[in-house]
Amino acid sequence: MTTSYNERSIYYTTQGEGNPIVLLHGFLESSSIWESFVTEFGKRRQIICIDLPGHGKSETLAEEHSMELMAEVVEQVLKELKVEKADLLGHSMGGYVALAFLEKNPEKVNKLILLNSTSAEDSDEKRENRDRSIKLVQKNKQAYISMAISNLLTPDNNLRFQTQVDDLKKEAMLFPTEGIVAALKGMKNRTDRTRVLKHFSGKKFMLTGEQDPLLDYQDIEDLAEGTRSKLYAFPGGHLSYLENKNQFIKIVHFIE
């Protein structure tokens, strides 16, 4: 299904009925990462999956896809589906978008689940890395995507899930370069939303990988404690939904 936002096409899917949950993918991913979960989760509730701008089948909206802009896209999809309140589950960049949505629409969020994500803004070092990433993806898109996705997992899990990792890379190669750059700019310039997370009165959860190459485990543990979020830790890296599929399913069912 598609909806229009600023005269650009946004792709989404919906399945099941009742107690809606919105699944938001991360950078260089699409709603396809949730395909193996939709049938399982959709047995008891409505599952809404959205391709964020410049990813999957959704068009690029602007030179920079701020988290606020992408949150407005989520709001547009929920409006079209006449969903007044939902759980939000965001992986990595999807978590940043979920927090931006929460900041603007706290009354529309029931539960918040951050998967391999954080409420913190980028450090100066990470902002510099975003700038380098922008230059690399503009110069050699294939090399950048291959490196960026491989760096999400531990070396052992890169081998263990080689087929799935290769599929992620192949799909990301189909995304427009300008969409990838727009997301990098948006993540680089996003604001710290720890205050938003802390003051959210609904149930909130952080799911993280103990060996995540992108997010320091101790930082996430401290963040969960400081914001009164329930923490679940998995072995492995930044793709916990892939590296720990069965445990991920159990926790999402429990949270429901």
Image (cartoon, helix red, strand yellow):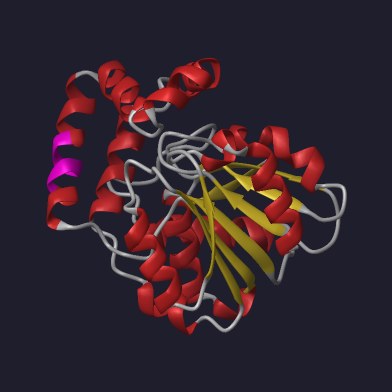
Residue 56 in view, yes or no: yes
Compared to 190, does 61 lie above or below? above
Residue 56 at x, y = what percent? 52, 32
Q: In this view, does 57 lie above or below 90?
A: above
Residue 10, image quadrant = top right
Quadrant of the rendered image containing residue 241: top right
Magenta-drawn stretch contains 131: yes
Q: Give x and y (percent) for residue 223.
A: 38, 69
**Picture coordinates of residue 70, whole percent (x, y):** 45, 55
By secondary structure, the bulk of the magenta-drawn segment is best described as helix
142 horizontally vs 127: left or right: right
Q: Residue at x 84, y 61 (%)?
A: 18
Taking 17 as reference, is 27 above or below it? Answer: above
Total residue callouts: 0
Residue numbers of the magenta segment = 128-132
**Residue at image point 66% right, 45% down:** 247
